[in-house]
Amino acid sequence: MFIADYTKISFKHIYLQNFRTKQIKELINKWFSDNPSINEDKFDNILKSFRAFGFPRTPMAVSLFLWIIEKQENKPINNAKLLEKFIESLLDKINKEEIYSEKFDFDNKIHLLAKIAKFMLDKENDNYYLKYTELLDYVRSYFIKQQFETVFDAQKIIDNLIERGIFIKNDAEIKFRFASFFHFFLAKQMIFVPKFKKYVLDKKNYLNFTDEIDYYTGLERNAESVLEILSERVDNGFAYLKRKISHQLINDFFETSNSVVDDIDFSNIIENKPTKKELEQMNDEVLEKTSVKKKIERKDKIESDNIKLDRLLKLTANVLKNTEFVDKNENLKTEVYRKVVEYNTLLLFRDKFFY
């Protein structure tokens, strides 16, 4: 039912659509017009981040993301730190009112949201939602334990988090707006509660928490113990495939009288090089296939050995990339890098010859 049904005024429906590749690129070029370091690679990385986080490509979301990237220029960035800055902006961390003790400040919100994420995980509802009244009771009980009940209004805090886009409420149900937010705050819970971190990293559980471990190591960036655990597990995971696919088989496959370059027809490549417009169309197709990740996948047991190996190798590579502050044991990082390259080759041969 619309207002137009009750008035003689002529209304025109206008819809805010997601930006397409060309529009995102134009905004990036204007935003960073004075920065020559922004090139095609940077543009591709921004698109990858949107796909990874599952954010909508609205003008506001893209602009906010570009603002965060601009503020982080010339500093090490990973997806976890980018997402942290995005959430900080939503929670208005820079608001000067945050400094007053009677305010429910940024750190209060982060700790509460981490506990809520864990509470949602324990409830195991589809999409990890909670009833609004259930969440309200939980926050009130949390405030009582922290002796905050006379200082903060639980309902106002929750409604403020909905208003700021952290939660989304549908009728009587409430959940994190994006799946990436849920994973991020579980990663925060790993930082705050060592017992939960131990649970996540347990052999029986860790492959169900790959996003959380990725974010955790991206936030900490010196999680050497996690890299050591994954180094051992990736060896155990690929032991059978390593025995099945010998190095000789790999060497024989690549044995050839002609080099790869000799077999390339460069004139054909130049003739069929995609135009700028065609590249934008290809990017648009990828973006359109990547839906906004509002649905949170259940952490059910993984039955497929192939999926387990794929997840394990990807997680190991991501954690290696995140552990930039692990400088006491460079041999570990070098060894894990070698394993990632070797086992990725084994996966290529597995898919080509055995399935």
Image: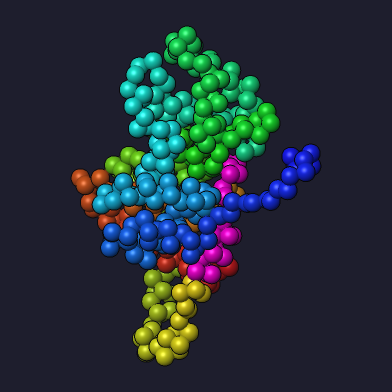
Q: Nearer the viewer, residue 169 or 263?
A: 169
Q: Residue at x 47, y 35 (%)?
A: 186
Screen quadrant of the C terminus: bottom right
User: Within the image, what quadrant is residue 40 found in?
Assistant: bottom left
Report if residue 292 lies within the magenta region. yes
In the image, residue 154 above or below residue 321: above
User: What is the magenta range?
Assistant: 280-299
Residue 329 in view here: yes
Screen quadrant of the N terminus: top right
Q: Point out the residue furthest to the left here.
A: 328
Report if residue 103 lies within the magenta region. no
Q: Residue at x 63, y 51 (%)?
A: 15
- The image position of residue 65, as x and y in percent, is 42, 48
User: Within the image, what quadrant is residue 253 found in?
Assistant: bottom left
Q: Residue at x 62, y 38 (%)?
A: 127
- The image position of residue 239, as x and y in percent, is 43, 57
In the image, residue 211 above or below residue 246: above
In the image, residue 160 above or below residue 343: above
